[in-house]
Image (tube, rainbow, N blue to C red):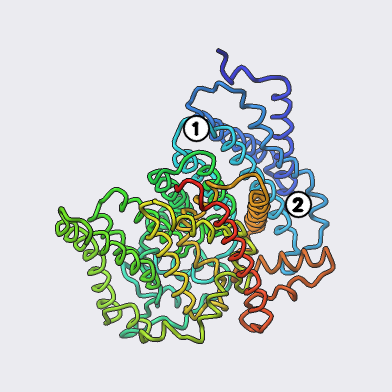
Amino acid sequence: MKTNFNQLTPFNVFLYLALLSAMEYFFVSAGQLLFLNFPFSTGLAELVLGAFNLLLLLEGWLVFKLDNGKGRKHFLTPLLLTHLPWFLGFALPWMIRLNLPDPHNFLFRKIEILFGLMWVTHVFKFCGWLLWRVRENGKPVSYTFGIVAIFFFVGISLWTTQCDLSGDEPHYLLMAQSLIRHGNLDLTPGYQNKEYLDFYHRGDLQPQGLEHVVDGKRYSHHPLGPVLLVLPGFFLLGRMGAVLTMALLTALALYLSLRVLELTGAYGRALQAIGTVGLFSSPFLLFAGLIFPETPTACLIALTLYLLLQKRWFGLGLTLGVFLWMHNRNVLLVIPVLVFLAVELWNHQKGRWEEVKQLAAGFAIPTALLVLYFHAIYGVWTPLGAHNESFTSLFRLSHFWIGFFGLVLDQECGLWFYFAIFGMTLAGGLMLWSSKNPLRYLVTGTFIFYYLFMSFYENLGLTPGTRYMVGVTPLMLFMLYHAFAKLKFNLWEILTLVSFAGGVVINWALAVIPWMRYNKLEGENLMLKILGGMVHQPLTASQPAFQAAVIGPQSYYISIFWVVVTVVLSVWFWRENKDQKNL
């Protein structure tokens, strides 16, 4: 049988040369525009040729890797066709005449956005085609999606790092830089000597209000766990190394989520659909590469489920202890898991106390180290003490309803706007609860506990709520599977496909123009403004969501409307399908 290497037809040769011409035109023309008398056009063309060949080799290797390495089917033509977005390079003259909203209406930004459009569209097209091609390759779904997720999240993150850091990200990196340069966590030299200019380019970086000055030394209030995770990558490649670390952790979170589903009996098209949602239409892509605690938390929650299924009690205890290193609000995940484990172990007649000892020993190690860290740095024993907060400050009733609806429809129109696919999470949770799945109570109970108590979080209404849902996305995917497994081609599947497509479009746009992901993630409201301008309707006025400065009755009415619609549809879907065989 002939291999794919015999498929170098005249059409493929022509397509390859045409794509290469488009790339060379874009890069050389952009270089000449930016640097006027650009002397390196020949060298740049050679660089483009080499980069294109390396990219094709990598993507060809991925095809063989996931297709059992047999190369039985023709692949070169569709592989080249996934590169068609490079032809958008010929739109460069039109792009530079386009007027963009301030402060982005300058030449370099226009070229950047056009390149982002070409690269991100290619990555989406290639990964979508590859997953369709290898859908019946006989390999575990988790393995296939895990490999593709590495390429996908790393590829997108390589582009989104064009944005300057914002929010808490530069402060995490300043902590990492202090550890590398000075061997301590005192940020005073970093601020005074502007050492942050190595990775931060938005002017002066000011200390945050909650930082602590102890004996003249300034310490961050941010958790140390994410800093330690990105430290090796930051040491090797600076900010890019930290970003790639988070992108790889995002891929790991998706892999572990799918692996846990497989171990509990998930299979087939429904599982592949969940992988597709996790890859293209979930909060994972929005936060892949961003330096926040939420992605490591997602890895840990998926790892917790995996270790529980494997009955590895010592490792499970270690994992639960590490949760607290990522952020103190992760206690809202640790508490329900520990309650579930207490009930689980109490029901074990044989070896109960040995399992308890292993779990307690594993949990005690990172917890004790965290206590010692807080005592050595801040002179207190708990994170609350370091933040000068009382325990009751975490449960202010005045924040509950803002938080409850803010997690759904926050200042950026929240979870429903970007990821409407998760509207079926409630239906999936109902089905999971009534199933025989061994993790049904842990998954649903942990998610409910986390959501309700996060509603007290005082930043909700001031900060996009989607960020706080990234860490529990593995739980949402787990619940979502039980709804997908019972989907039939009717109104439900049509609604699901439409909402999935909406999530993909939103994620694609935020990756193409990553500047919309920053500055408190205001890109989603910008999308509403752009759409509103097209249809001549004030969409941001009709969908005010939870803008911190303008929270009013309309925000609550809209949120209540969507929550009620979701609950009614979910219960209806559950009642229609509850008599099917339990999963």
| Residue 444 rendering spot, x and y as whole percentages | 43, 61
**Above/below status of 309 relative to 218:** above
The answer to whether one can see residue 469 in this image is: yes
State the residue in front, 233 or 78: 78
Q: Quadrant of residue 330?
A: bottom left
Circle 1: element type:
helix
| Residue 208 rendering spot, x and y as whole percentages | 47, 80
**Above/below status of 51 relative to 368:** above
The residue tagged 2 is 33
Give the distance between the C-alpha atoms of the residues marked 1 and 2, in whole angstroms.
41 Å
- Decide: few, some or many residues near mark 1? Use Cα within 10 Å; few <14, some 14-19, many ≥20: many
In percent of the image, x 58 and y 36: which residue is there?
Answer: 130
Q: Is residue 368 left or right of residue 200?
A: left
Q: Residue furthest front?
A: 579
Q: Amino acid at mark 2?
A: Leu
The residue tagged 1 is 66
| Residue 452 rendering spot, x and y as whole percentages | 46, 73
- Decide: few, some or many residues near mark 2? Use Cα within 10 Å; few <14, some 14-19, many ≥20: some
Q: Quadrant of residue 1?
A: top right
| Residue 563 rendering spot, x and y as whole percentages | 60, 69
The answer to whether one can see residue 116 in this image is: no
**Above/below status of 134 relative to 562:** above
Q: Amino acid at mark 1?
A: Leu
Q: Earlier in the sequence, mark 1 or mark 2?
A: 2
Q: Quadrant of residue 409?
A: bottom right
Circle 2: element type:
helix
In percent of the image, x 48 and y 62: which residue is there?
Answer: 291
Front: mark 1 or 2? 1
